[in-house]
Amino acid sequence: MAITGRVAALLALGLVPALLVPHALTVLTWTVLVVSIGALDWALAGRPDEVQISRAPMRALRLTEQTTSELTLTNTGKRPLRALVRDAWQPSAGAVADRHRVHLPAGESRRVRTTLAPRRRGELAAAGITVRSYGPLGLVARQRTLPAADRLHVLPEFASRRHLPSRLARLREMDGRTAVNVRGQGTEFDSLREYVIGDDVRAIDWRATARRSEVVVRTWRPERDRRVLIMLDTSRLSAARLGDVPRLDAGIEAALLLTSLAAQAGDRVDLIAAGRTVQARVRGEHSPTVMAELARSLAPLAPELLEPDWPMVAQEVRDRMSQRGLVVLLTALEPGAVESGLVKVVASLATEHQVVLASATDPEAQALRTVRESSAELFDAAAAERAELERDALARRLGRAGAEVIQRGPHDLAPALADTYLALKAAGRL
């Protein structure tokens, strides 16, 4: 039961007879009168348990998009229902105007709609549906909260997809060349053509030359159907906020863009999301639904506040990739990575695969390095400079171990990784 402000107003109105007839019996009589009217109003109110509620199915949506939660209310009772209905969701669902006033005659149905603007990815839950049914006088209400098992699936934003058309154009340009003057690992036979001055004599096809009575060379093109494995770090390093986004979200954006580009190139992309334990595994298998599967798997990811287990990650890579391919490590380039075993793992993997390590940097650290007006700002700038020097030294060490190292801001990491992938593919290093 819920009491409205009208009951308090009626009780306050009792001050008038109490002042005219200042006696305890007057106050008691007025109180009993108000309670009796309230009880009658409660008895005449429609019963919330006689309301059937159904929710229209909601599609999965990307972060920053909006959707509508639609409820259908049916009054199965014999009394009209004057109610306030609340479609409650957890705060991160971003429910807007979730309270609806409904007048529902007996046997009729009404629809109410609540706009949802999610503020985080993952699976968001409805907190419950509350029906508060008022009596004819609006003094007292019956109330009931129905548990809701409804879920809204919020996928990653994939804001970096705006970079995809330009990278696909470069990919088509690479595939459309008549000849690629690269031989060796990472290329495959394309066609034969007549020899011209400047061609590598090692590309001459002597059998074809003998048949045609003219010198013929083989042309090559970048291989398709290559293996790409993305390892997304979900350890404590991924929990840091870089400007307005967590490092984990910057890694997710880079993984989505690279997967979309590599799938268009005909490569097979696998993904492992791991920190101390493996949180998600996605197999490409040339499926046209790989992007949808990847988005669903990445949506619920959350950082583990533990150190990464790099030897476990290396074993996962070896279990997945039996032949040479591209291994992309999306992690933080921090000095503490040396103690956690990252350098040893990268050096080991680089002997078997092409390794790219991509790290999202903190834009605020760059700002600290440029402001030196006060003594406190000077110390902050010195600390930021030292951290930058340590990261650069670690990047050089990883480079000597055989890895390509990319360091960019959270919004620039995804296109930079896509460009590196295209450059490696054009050079025949995949």
Image (tube, grey):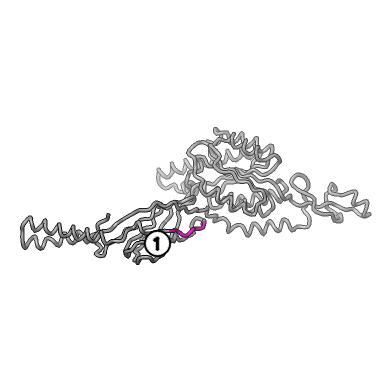
Quadrant location, the N terminus: bottom left
Residue 328: which quarter of the image? top right
Q: List the residue tagged with mark 1.
A: 73
x, y (%) of residue 409? 53, 50
Residue under the point 45% across and 55% down: 118
Between 203 and 77, the residue placed more toward the observer is 77
Q: Amino acid at mark 1?
A: Leu
In the displayed structure, does residue 73 sit left or right of residue 199? left
Q: Secondary structure at mark 1?
A: strand
Q: How many marks?
A: 1
x, y (%) of residue 103? 34, 66
Between 238 and 66, the residue placed more toward the observer is 66
Residue 4: which quarter of the image? bottom left
Between 286 and 158, the residue placed more toward the observer is 286
Residue 185: which quarter of the image? top right
x, y (%) of residue 56? 47, 60
Evaluate whether residue 9 shows in this view.
Answer: yes
Q: Which residues are magenta?
A: 54-59
Magenta region, main secondary structure:
loop
x, y (%) of residue 79? 31, 64
- The residue carrying pointer 1 sits among few (fewer than 14), some (14 to 19) or many (20 or more) residues within 10 Å by Cα, namely some
In the displayed structure, does residue 219 sit left or right of residue 46? right
In the rendered image, residue 17 lying in the magenta stretch gets the answer: no
Evaluate whether residue 331 shows in this view.
Answer: no
